[in-house]
Amino acid sequence: CGLREGVSEKRSTEYHLGLLKAKLAKYRAQLLEPSKSPAAKGEGFDVMKSGDARVALIGFPSVGKSTFLSLMTSTASEAASYEFTTLTCIPGVIEYKGANIQLLDLPGIIEGAAQGKGRGRQVIAVARTADVVIMMLDATKGEVQRALLEKELESVGIRLNKSKPNIYFKPKKGGGISFNSTVTLTQCSEKLVQLILHEYKIFNAEVLFREDCSPDEFIDVIVGNRVYMPCLYVYNKIDQISMEEVDRLARRPHSVVISCGMKLNLDYLLEKLWEYLALTCIYTKKRGQRPDFTDAIILRKGASVEHVCHRIHRSLASQFKYALVWGTSTKYSPQRVGLTHMMEHEDVIQIVKK
Ligand SMILES: Nc1nc2c(ncn2[C@@H]2O[C@H](COP(=O)(O)OP(=O)(O)OP(=O)(O)O)[C@@H](O)[C@H]2O)c(=O)[nH]1
Ligand SMILES: [K+]
Ligand SMILES: [Mg+2]
């Protein structure tokens, strides 16, 4: 009996917590509303997207963001020993494996950034538009900085190195709440899901958990507008710490250790960045010839044959008859496909015009 009471107490704690979190998430969302006003919207921060991918440099002041940009690109961004040297968004381009990667240097951010401290809001708004975030940390004080910045980004709906929760959620006009799961749930129950939905004034919906998600993850799905973003934690200034510490930091998940000052480990960082960007390289082939492996077309994940056409020539899509594709995106090699076919990394394509 005591055990059962314990279990039910634990359950009711779960309900309270789940509900409390739903309320908090709602409250936070309201807090962030005013940022949509034009005044608060990144003055001087609206840098045009260019190239094949965008990487944002996020970090506390003076961790070496500008030093890094100046090292990796042909753009010079002022670096100095005092904090808040950089005051706007400064774009540079990294050329790597035939791709142009836009690298954005940004002002340093501190605790409270999400609430508008310093230029925190503008910086975070830019981070949201990136394909990968590099969180640059000073190796001599990395752990504290990392936890604080993760919290800041988390509070505005940016989810680092997480994938979208595998929950099917569809609000309906009527019929109440239909709840199902394909796996055993250890963190959520039908009751809790219902309570959370009611908190959001949702009384009719279809919910299917395909994964053992937490209440927070379920709330993320209801609220929507979350950004799931790969993040590399880059510990700079390793010239200032002991070998043991370098070893420890380098083994942390999603982490790379570097020294901009001594130009250490920068190639490895580029390799990792390339991996996290997960860009799709497509090779073209002319009829009767071998594929051109020297010059890849670089696209974001989820690109179609139509995207490939646009990249080759503006008018190619309108003259398109069909394409032959070799690679992992097709069942047979080659396979005849149309404009909507989704390409995969290292596919070879031959386009046939009308
Ligand atoms: N020891 C050491 N110092 C470095 C390294 N990289 C950068 N620095 C120094 O750190 C200081 C700050 O560098 P910045 O590039 O201005 O840093 P930031 O992150 O852009 O700073 P804010 O723009 O103010 O946010 C400068 O004095 C750099 O010379 C490094 O690898 N080792
Ligand atoms: K600085
Ligand atoms: Mg700077």
Image (tube, rainbow, N blue to C red):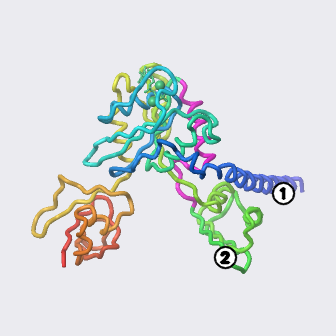
Q: Quadrant of residue 113?
A: top right
Q: Is residue 321 magenta?
A: no
Please give the residue where the numbered disc 2 appears in the rendered image.
Answer: 172
| The C terminus lies in quadrant | bottom left
Q: Position of residue 336 (x, y in %)?
A: 25, 76
Report whether residue 121 is seen: yes
Residue at image position (57%, 55%) is: 226
Q: Quadrant of residue 302?
A: bottom left
Residue kind at label 1, given as amino acid type: Ser
Outermost residue on the right side: it is: 1
Q: Position of residue 45 (x, y in %)?
A: 47, 43
For the residues labelled 2 and 1, the Cα–Cα distance comes to: 32 Å
Magenta-drawn segment: 141-165
Q: Is mark 1 within 8 Å of ligand 1?
A: no
Report whether residue 212 is seen: no
Decide: is 66 above or below 279: above
Please give the residue where the numbered disc 1 appears in the rendered image.
Answer: 8
Residue kind at label 2, given as amino acid type: Lys
Q: Left or right of 1: which side holds 220? A: left
Decide: is 44 above or below 223: above
Decide: is 158 above or below 342: above
